[in-house]
Amino acid sequence: MSAPQISGFLIDIDGVLITGNHSIPGAAETLHYLQQQNIPFLLITNTTRKSRVNVWHQLKRFGLSVEQEQILTAPLAAVNWLKQRHVSAIHLFLSGSAVHDFRDFKITSGQPEYVVVGDVGNDLSFDRLNQAFRLLMRGARLLALQKNRYWQTSEGLTIDAGALVAALEYASHRRAIVIGKPRREFFLEGVKLLNLPPEKVAIVGDDLEADIQGGKKAGLQTIAVKTGKFRSYLLEKLKIKPDHIIESIADLPNLLS
Ligand SMILES: [Mg+2]
C-alpha cells in the first residue's frame, strides 16, 4: 500500500456499491468491515435524480446500511452553494425526487438567477431544453449539478447530464459552473466531513475522469474499481493512473490489510 496510509474513504455509489437494480457483490460486507474497523467513510455521488433521503432508502433496500449524514450528493452540494450566495430564485432542469432537495428556493420559469441542470432521463424534451436555453439567453446563469458523459444502467451505458449541459453551453455561449465531481470543492466538502486531511483519504470510484482524476486534483489517494462504467481501455486513452485498481468494492478490505 502506498504512503501515506489511508485513514478514510469517499466512496462513489453508482457502479461501485450498486448497479442497475442490485448491489454489487461484497458491497454490504465492505461497508460493514469499515464500520467494524472504525474507518470513517462517506458516500459521495453525482446522481442527480434522487434526493438524499431517497438514495438512503434505496441503499437500505439493497442491504447497505449507512447514516443519512454519510451521504453527500451533488444536489445537496448545489443547495449549499446557492444558499452561501443568497440565491433565492432558480429554474430546475431536473427530474425525480432530487427536486425536493431544492424546496427552500423559489422555483420559477420567470426570472431565475440560475438554471440548475441535472440528468432528466426520459423527461427530456425539446421544449424543456429550449426553455432552459431561453432563460440563459435572458441572463440566468448555468449551474450544472455534474457534467458526467454517461453512466452504467441495467440496460447499458446511458447518456448523463453532461451532454445536456454541453448542449446548453454551446447554444447559449455560457460556461456552466459544475458542482459535483470532479470539482475540487465537492471532494473537499466530503473530506471535511470526515475530519481528515485530503492525503489520508482515498476516493473509490468507477469513473476515471470524475472520481479518479478529480480525486487526484483534490489531493486524495485514488482507487478505481473495475465495475460499473469502468473500461480498461480508458486507462490508456485518458492517461489517468489510479493509485490502486481493484476488481470490485469487495476487494477493499484486502487492500487495507
Ligand atoms: Mg460511479
Image: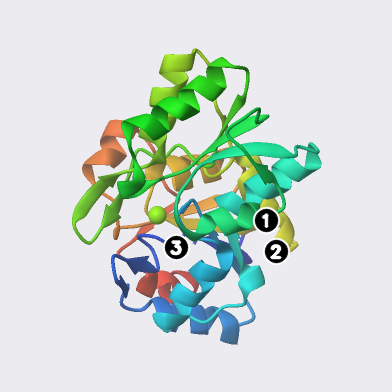
Among the two numbered marks 3 and 1 on one chain, the one whose residue lies closer to the N terminus: 3
Residue 175 can be seen in this image: no
Q: What element carries label 1?
A: helix
Residue denoted by label 3? 13
Q: Is residue 43 above or below residue 64?
A: above
Residue behind mark 1? 191
Q: Label 3: few (<14), some or many (≥20) within 10 Å?
A: many
Label 3 with label 2: CB-CB less than 8 Å: no
Residue at mark 3 to residue at mark 2: CA–CA distance: 17 Å
Residue that lies at the very extreme toward the bottom in this rendered image = 36
The residue at which mark 2 appears reads as 194
Q: What residue type is labelled 3?
A: Ile
Residue 118 placement (x, y as % from top left): 47, 43
- Mark 3 and ligand 1: say if the CB distance to the nearest ligand atom is below 8 Å: yes
- Check if mark 1's residue and mark 2's residue have beta carbons within 8 Å: yes
C-alpha distance separating marks 1 and 2? 5 Å
Pair 3/2: label in front: 3
At 45% across and 75% down in the image, what residue appears? 59
Q: Nearer the viewer, residue 246 or 71?
A: 71
Q: Locate residue 147: give its quadrant.
A: top left
Q: Of 70 and 256, which appears nearest the observer?
A: 70
Q: Residue 101 carries which label?
A: none
* Residue 240 seen anywhere in this rendered image of the structure: yes
